[in-house]
Amino acid sequence: MSKKKLLIAITILIIAAICGYLYFYGTNESTYADITDLNNEYNIDNELTDAQQKLNSDIKPAQIYVDSFDKNAIALTFDGLPDPTTTDRLLDLLDKYQIKATFFVDGSTAAKDNDSLKKIYQRKYPIGNYTYVGLAELDKIPTEEVLAQLLKTQKVIKVTTGTAPDIFKAPRTIYTDKLLKIAAVAGLNAAVKTNVYVNPDTLTTDAAAESFVNQIIPGSIVSVPIATPVNRVKYEPGKTDEKPAFDKQPGLNVNMSDDNKHQNIVDVTERLLKALQKRSMPTEYITDFRLVNQLNNKYSLNDTASFDAVKTFTQKMVFLTDKLFFKKAFAAAQDYQVIRQNNNSIKAAPINLILTTEPAVCFTFAGLSKPSVVYSILAQLKQMNATGTFFVMKNDIDKNPQLIQTIINSGNEVGVGIRSLKNADFYSTCSEIDYVQNRLKSMGATPQLAMQPWGGITDDTREAVSAMGLTMIGSYVSVVKSNMKDYTSPQQVMQELFGKYVYSMGRGWIVYFRLDYYTDDSLAGKVMDLIKRDKINNIAYNSFYDDPRINPNNDSAYSIKSVSSVLFNKTYRYKFATENKVPEQLRSSQNPLLNEHIDFKNYIKKRYIGNPAIGADSNTLGFSIAQLHTLDTVGQIHTDKPVVFLTFDDWGTDASINKLLYVLRKHKANATFFILTHNVLKNPNLLRAIAVGGNDIGAHSDMHKPMTTQNVHNNTMRPSVQSRQEYMQDLSSCYKKLETITGDVSINGHPALTRYFRPPQLTISKMGFECLYDNGFSYIIDGSYSTHDYDQTNLQGMINSIKAAIFDENGKVRNGAILVMHMSDSGEYTAVALDMILTANDQRKDNDPAKFIPARLSDYLKDGYDQSNPVFDKELSPTVDYNKYLYKNSGYNIGDE
């Protein structure tokens, strides 16, 4: 018995071994012999060569299948190849509901698994070319790549089915004449232009599908997305911004993770087909639709072919009636579909801050449901000699057309206000914009702007604004917060909005007022008045002898204007500088010190302009004794001219800096501004204004961390709180911001941006110098005298401090003196004191030896200027004996001159 069992076991093992051998070595060869070698089977080298040759001939472009509004049917397409299981279920649904559809196949999916493609072909559904990977924006892709995309897909489909398609489509693509010629040489006769796209994630219920289908105009081409389009085009930064407007608010944290649950495409399709059946909407194949040679923005409804295609008398009457009474509605609906494709999915990014150097602030208003409040605001604006932009919503113009007409007649601007509606989509938003635009145009206005004043802004809304050709506006300062509704005083609102440290508004800032929000109807007007008085009027330079209300030459005041008047004023507008717009020697990617062949030893010696407080035991760290001996401790530029250099450090607001700019402009003087850049991107227009005023722009670090600080307990110097890596990053970030905002500014061929650096607190270290050297800063400049303007308690003290910097104890000009002042709001007396000093200087005759010449550092730090070599300017030969003068006009007694 045991022998029999053993024999049976051996026999089973032998049979199993034979089967295994046959499986792995026998059947494997025949089975895998059918697997396609993708490289050889789908090779298109010959086709590509032939097609490229044909492109050079006079090839007739492919045509385009478009919507046919004379039809009482739609054409349905599926864009992308589903997996085999999904394909089976979709084909069964199409059979069940007796739907005609066309499948546009991406070649790469078909090449990997051709089962789905075979099933579609076997069930006799038309097949089109969807490029090899579902490539979007085909009109922006190089010709050779487009050809490869189309030809390879043609090859895959032909190898699998035996027939190559003659139609194609590509997502988010404009069918240009060039593209249609490329398609023609690839063997494609026509493109397909969809005008209705299904968003699967919105058809979550049968009711949603029915609502969607009921909005479809018969004759539309409707597409269901299967594959996600692949975008190979890189747009320029800043052109489109995919985030909603409220993402731009400072300090707001938004979770951008995609938590949406996507709908199953089979379920979505069944809901769609059921809705089509319920509406009794038949389907036709794409090839039964209208074929045109090129796309126009509009297709006329009154063409003979469309009328002749309508067979019965009743249908003809309906057609003519629609043409007569509903032509406008049909045209509008069609226009939205056309402009959506032409817009190429661009989404408007709300403009919160206008990039401009114009000294103007923009006031905007919405919530116009309380006429008494609006009329009061209009009266205030007139009294202020100001204009604003009022965003008009559909309900505003329907309920109070006379109010809107009054706004327009008063010289203020009107824009399109967009309501935040729950179920709004691209088409409904376009319709609402169109309605408001037309109503406003009938009143004599031409709106160019749109704003959605409240609610989250959807991508559909932003796309609609872009497609309708409007500019979307947001706000830089919103005078509305949810907790302010019942506030009773404007001071409460101001404190909540601005706190202690927002001293003023700024150039190009958009300030938004909602007029129907406060319980107290008078509060909006009171807040507007207070902002004007405390945050705008304070920007103007106003001294006891130079008042802009009296002096017509005082142009320091900021105006309040409508958005468009500032936004479209090209005289002052600018863009952030790209590197190719910046002079090569000033680009952050370059280090000019390498080209100048200056080593670190000479960099310390020749390129540092120091100050008298520098010494071996004060304000320095890390230098050798030999290096310390080479450091400049005078801080003056070598010149025998009575030239002084006005310099300003740190950063400030328009309230402080605009006054300095006016004083310099008034006296035809220029200065050097060393910018602390930590907050500069919050007010780039102010920095740009400094530059276009003809002043030098230098760096003062990003975070104002000194290179070394003094230990008060033992008077030793301590290292910087920043590591070498942190300091390198600080310097790089600082310069990059300056380059971005001012790198392309050049006045009479003289670039505003410099590679000058002023050390915070005027202290220096070897490590800091090494980092500056590696970052390409050409000169390190302390200065000969610090005015300590931030500590001055009265005007006379500030005047005396400036005079001490410019003149020696005998009243003689300190040639080459570098004055260290500040542009911050703490320098209360700097502008007025400087104005008085310069006024006295202007009154001196040119041959007065006490007269000084204000200059920029860049006027002298050129041609390899060497601080260690005191060679004076050759141009001026001193002909005046300065010592014989008593210098009674030196400026020490300004009031007596």
Image (cartoon, rainbow, N blue to C red):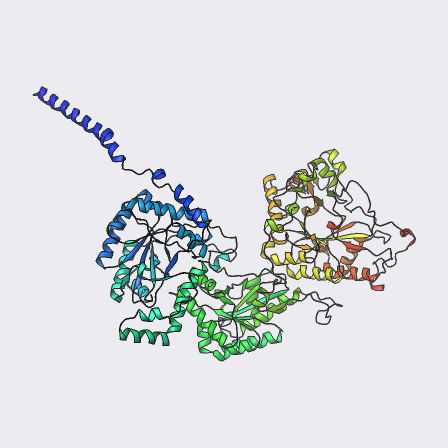
Whether residue 743 sits left or right of residue 71 in the image: it is right
Residue at figure coordinates x 28%, y 62% from the top left? 283
Which is more toward the observer, 485 or 773?
Answer: 773
Q: Position of residue 24 (x, y in %)?
A: 24, 30
Q: Quadrant of the N terminus?
A: top left
Residue at far front of view: 58
Residue 137 visible: no
Residue at 78% over, 40% down: 868
Callout count? 0
Name the outermost residue toward the bottom.
402
User: How far across and down, in percent of the image, does residue 471 sit?
Assistant: 51, 64
Based on the displayed image, in which of its 4 quarters is residue 326 positioned?
A: bottom left
Which of these two is toward me, 640 or 286? 286
Taking depth in this image into account, of 626 and 518 the one nearest to the observer is 626
> Left or right: 791 with respect to 133?
right
The residue positioned farthest toward the top in the image shown: 3
Query: Percent x, y for residue 295?
Result: 42, 62
Q: Quadrant of residue 552?
A: bottom right
Residue extending farthest to the right is 884
Q: Is residue 413 visible?
A: yes
Q: With respect to residue 416, does 460 lie above or below?
A: above
Instruction: Give the percent coordinates (x, y) of residue 36.
Output: 31, 38
Quadrant containing the C terminus in the rendered view = bottom right
